[in-house]
Image (spheres, coloured by chain):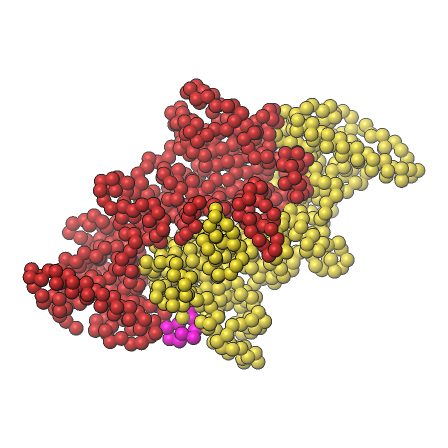
Chain colours: A red, B yellow
Amino acid sequence: MSSTTNAPEEKISKEAAKKEAAKLEKLHRKQEKEEESARKIASLLSLDDESFSENENYGGDVTLTELNSPADHKWREATEGKKWTDVGDLVEEMVGLEVLIRGRLETYRHKSSKLGFLMLRQSGFKVQCVATQSEETKVSVNMIKFLKQLSSESFVNVIGVVLLPKDPVTASTQQVEIQVRKAYCVNNALPQLPLIVENAARSEADVKAGKAGADRDTHLNYRVIDLRTPANQAIFRIEMQVKKAFREFLESKGFIEIDTPKLIAGSSEGGSAVFRLDYKGQPACLAQSPQLHKQMAILGDFRRVFEIIIHLCEFVGLDVEMEIQTHYSEIMDLVDELFVFIFTKLNERCNKELEAVRKQYPFVPLKFLPKTLRLTFAEGIQMLKDAGVEINPLGDLNTESERKLGQLVLEKYNTEFYMLHRYPTAVRPFYTMPSGDDSRYSNSFDAFIRGEEIISGAQRVHIPEFLEERAGEFFGTYDWYGSPPHGGFGAGLERVVMLFCALNNIRKTSLFPRDPQRLAP
Amino acid sequence: MSSTTNAPEEKISKEAAKKEAAKLEKLHRKQEKEEESARKIASLLSLDDESFSENENYGGDVTLTELNSPADHKWREATEGKKWTDVGDLVEEMVGLEVLIRGRLETYRHKSSKLGFLMLRQSGFKVQCVATQSEETKVSVNMIKFLKQLSSESFVNVIGVVLLPKDPVTASTQQVEIQVRKAYCVNNALPQLPLIVENAARSEADVKAGKAGADRDTHLNYRVIDLRTPANQAIFRIEMQVKKAFREFLESKGFIEIDTPKLIAGSSEGGSAVFRLDYKGQPACLAQSPQLHKQMAILGDFRRVFEIIIHLCEFVGLDVEMEIQTHYSEIMDLVDELFVFIFTKLNERCNKELEAVRKQYPFVPLKFLPKTLRLTFAEGIQMLKDAGVEINPLGDLNTESERKLGQLVLEKYNTEFYMLHRYPTAVRPFYTMPSGDDSRYSNSFDAFIRGEEIISGAQRVHIPEFLEERAGEFFGTYDWYGSPPHGGFGAGLERVVMLFCALNNIRKTSLFPRDPQRLAP
């Protein structure tokens, strides 16, 4: 093989026939696509294909089905015994070493027939790979042509040498670049994509400044592409850490993680008509919350339980239920410690991820106190009143007054996370325990991040007679057989992360969001 | 208050009027119940009740709503500043100390008007509490009468002194007993329960020997009582440890925990008609597995993902999907390491729990190798053939042949956990990658515990053209936009624990089981 063999179109004078070249190029690409497709099928059927053997340093598609497809064979020989390096792990200390990496081709810049630049992206990290035709690199002009025809978002395996670039590469997340020696396409993407990752990753400010973005539906319709942006790669790692810290803390306090049924007989707890279905001839519905079953787990003597589940309408619930020893403030103590733990761990463990989110969606870190502020509902009402906002003391707060109160609390107490408790009984569910000293109020609480509710909790009525009296027939179908005093709370994972990062839309923190219009992807 | 004041019925001669006494006792109980109920309502309404003030060392029901109900007041004063001790933590080193404990009254044995024994149970641990009337203990005959009338399964707070019993108490799980000083009923259970915990905890051998048990439906109908048995308390702690070890291991390998939608548009992946519903006017159905969405997460560049979810028909799925670098054996490597890790951790961390299960359901610990045995499907077929069992080499194994092969593997390799791979393509789902060297076989595997399948996994077809060819129209609705080679597997949490503990029914490892007949509780 010769690295100076030029393909036919390289012989046409560029000045004289730019348009013809473009046409030819187009045709050529089409032919290449067709050949590519043929090779793909061929390799799937394990047929030999001469075109692969002309150069051992590149090719596609690797099928990974077994060892005997020609593309597989070449790259397997090339990578035999080599270890994989993650793009995010490429550092200065590796300069001079040969590495084997894999990533998506984010962009290809064609400098000349002898020089091309590939930006490879893996899990949001990016590195520039330089393909230079030379005797030393064993990169041929044909190999550069092969790289040039790869579609964006194709998966590419690259073997190359780690170098320090002369000038920092702005689009890259790594300090080093890779001098390409071998490159194999693992799977070529479609030549035209409905969403470009670069555009999906654009900040609002950049879009306002005229750079190409994408509208929300495009983001969500092509979620598998959208998820590849650094911010999205970060958001779902942050969510994992919330779940992890949530479990870690609760386990240290003796909680047991349970799984409760999602299908229940008859109509749902709330009595609403949504999500009815037929279960092998019986009328059934989908549980809208694990409320009743987590209470039943307490009755089943597990004492302190939690569950992380997908609720209907598809938010991920962080649900907790526990025995109370003496007072409902025990639940608020837990919420206090638990969420301070979660926020602290996020700041400790998710530095890179929070930075990636901030880059696309700028935000100021959440202000919270080591010991969470607790106000009674009456105190909250008073603060609002003092600020000129009149609220019914036995009614509920609306979103606007919650935000206003959040502002007042921030000004007065310098925290964006606090709890409000002893809500009016009238605005809480029937299974909420009224306060013993004044039954117009209840042993209940909400917690707020940046002025928005994220947690709702309460002591539950555990005395059957009283529960029946409050619940009417519904709870009559359940027998309690001796219940300890208990209570609990629920929070939405997506809301926690959305508000922690001050994101403006809940869809940003849901992997595959659902809404009244959206059931796909 | 005097500890020698006797109630009226104590003055009747026991020899002369046993029947009358019984009647009177019955009446008295009824009256007590009524009074109890009245007190309950009274305390809920925060009214004062003179009957509470006659003795400060006992009473009921504690409402825990606030500080001003009489029952609350008494016991709050008595417990002020005291720490709670868990029944399971009561040990010999505490002898002589006064402790505050809470538990359910499993049984009450009435020795005389001056001596009663309470067996208190908390999270499956049991301790005997002895109430002896004396000046020293400040226990009155009235207090013993109060204890006598408590229903089984009532919640009781006890303050008492830790002692070593003269003779070991067989029903107790602790070495020590408690000399009662004060006792407050937190919540009285119904006087007649549909299931007795003692019976629910009976081993098969005991039931065969004539002791009272309960049939399966009674267990499941009254699950909140059934869950209180030591074996059930243990089983769901074991399940939590499986989930914990599963996550712990996968996180250490760079996996991300995700949540995928449960509502999807149109009909489900499998195309089956079950669980259709109306979603705000759109036809929708419940996802029967996270298969497609976990693959989409790989396409969204998360590289390695897992999810623990409740599937329909309500088993808890342990689902994993990952990029493949070179060969599908990478998935089997993960299954090998992951499950050896889980089994090892269960044996390390769940000693007490496994013992509690074994006590009701005897079993021999699972035999497994440090490096999991891997056989090809063809090798498995050959082993069966050598043992005289003929199987179609391109068909599937039935339950019987799986069990037989499990036996042969145990005899030959001394393991009850192994993997069988390269299943015939015809018996695997359409998205399974056929083997490159022989498309009659596929890059797929199952894993078995004690001769029963617990894991099914495979490399997925990641090439759109080939997938469309295999899938027909279904996958046509999903665009792939460049997929890395990937694969994964799913296991059922309940099956893993059921087979690890050699239990005979999957309902035993489901918190609130569902089956074609059962949608409640």
Residue at 24 percent across and 42 percent down: it is: A206
Tell me: residue B6, above or below residue A138.
above
Tell me: residue A459, above or below residue B439.
above
Residue at 27 percent across and 64 percent down: it is: A185
Q: Give coordinates of residue B501: x percent, y percent.
A: 59, 59
> Which part of the image, by quadrant, shows the N terminus of chain B?
top right
Start and end of the magenta stretch? B435-443
Residue B4 located within the stretch drawn in magenta = no
Q: Is residue B26 visible?
A: yes
Q: Give coordinates of residue A416: x percent, y percent.
A: 40, 31
Residue B440 located within the stretch drawn in magenta = yes
Magenta highlight: main SS: loop
Q: Give coordinates of residue A201: x percent, y percent.
A: 29, 47
Left or right: A262 in relation to A473: left
Q: Residue furthest right?
A: B16
Q: Quadrant of residue B29?
A: top right
- Most foreground residue, A174 or A83: A174
- Most foreground residue, B99 or A135: A135
